[in-house]
Amino acid sequence: MATLLQKKLGLLLIILTLLTGCGLQTDLNRETQTDSDLPSATVDRVVDGDTVHIILDGEEESVRLLLVDTPETKHPNLPVQPYGEQASQFAKEKLTEGTQIQLEYDGPKRDKYDRLLAYIWIDGELFNEMLLEEGFARYAYEYDPPYTHSDQLKEAETKAKAADLNIWSEDGYVTEDGFTTVDIDETSSDVYYQNCTAVAEANASPISEGDPGYGTHLDRDGDGIGCE
């Protein structure tokens, strides 16, 4: 009787092992396939917060980031808008020349200016989302919904808005059509710390939410106090 029970238990363990192995292999294949599906490119230069020049397959291309809009700094008919320079600087620090990135298309591949429309991934992080998290961009321009990352990008915008970060720090500045001309004191927005080392060097640590230079990239545990 005991021998029969042992055989049944042994058979059950073998079946469970095979099923688990198949599941793990499926997950591994899915991750590998996902990575291989995304074309790789190299950053050439940042134009502004939401536009980047890249080298793709040996050719120079201009990429307009999907679903985000940063204040203008290069528009021929508009002045430099508040927080536009800060958004551009943030992009330049994250997307330095020669940085390897991956592109993800979602909907129409190009806009009317022949720019690529894409998400940019850097080291496994979605740069479009970073802009929204820091309050440097608004969620905008749904050309052909639904979009793959729409929900997470909207959530990032909502959190930045609730925290009054950068473009959200002044009532009435962000509109459904873009950014309006308002009188904004940008003294505090001129401060940007790339990391906690920079905060320490400025004798500004710990840095709290609402302090000049505070950003969620400095506050890993999300408690409102960075570089503790």
Image: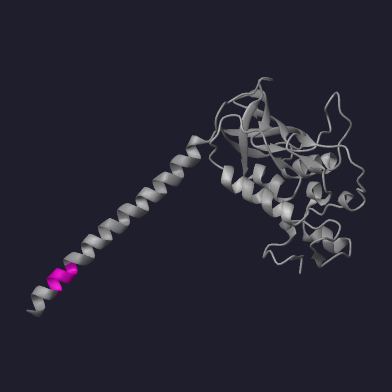
The reply to whether residue 125 is visible in this rendering is no
- In depth, the one of 182 and 22 nearer the eye is 182
The reply to whether residue 197 is visible in this rendering is yes
Q: Main secondary structure of the magenta part?
A: helix
- In the rendered image, the vertical position of residue 92 relative to residue 203, given as above or below: above
Where does the magenta region start and end? 6-10
Instruction: Locate residue 109, reporting x and y percent.
Output: 58, 26
Q: Say whether residue 7 is magenta.
A: yes
Q: Image quarter for residue 50? A: top right
Instruction: Locate residue 27, reporting x and y percent.
Output: 40, 50
Image quarter (top left, top right, bottom left or bottom right) of the N terminus = bottom left
- In depth, the one of 55 and 149 nearer the eye is 149
Q: Image quarter for residue 20? A: bottom left
- In the rendered image, the vertical position of residue 70 relative to residue 197, given as above or below: above
Instruction: Locate residue 213, reporting x and y percent.
Output: 83, 56
> What residue is shown at x 68% (from left), y 39% (from top)?
99
Q: Spot the residue most to the bottom.
A: 2
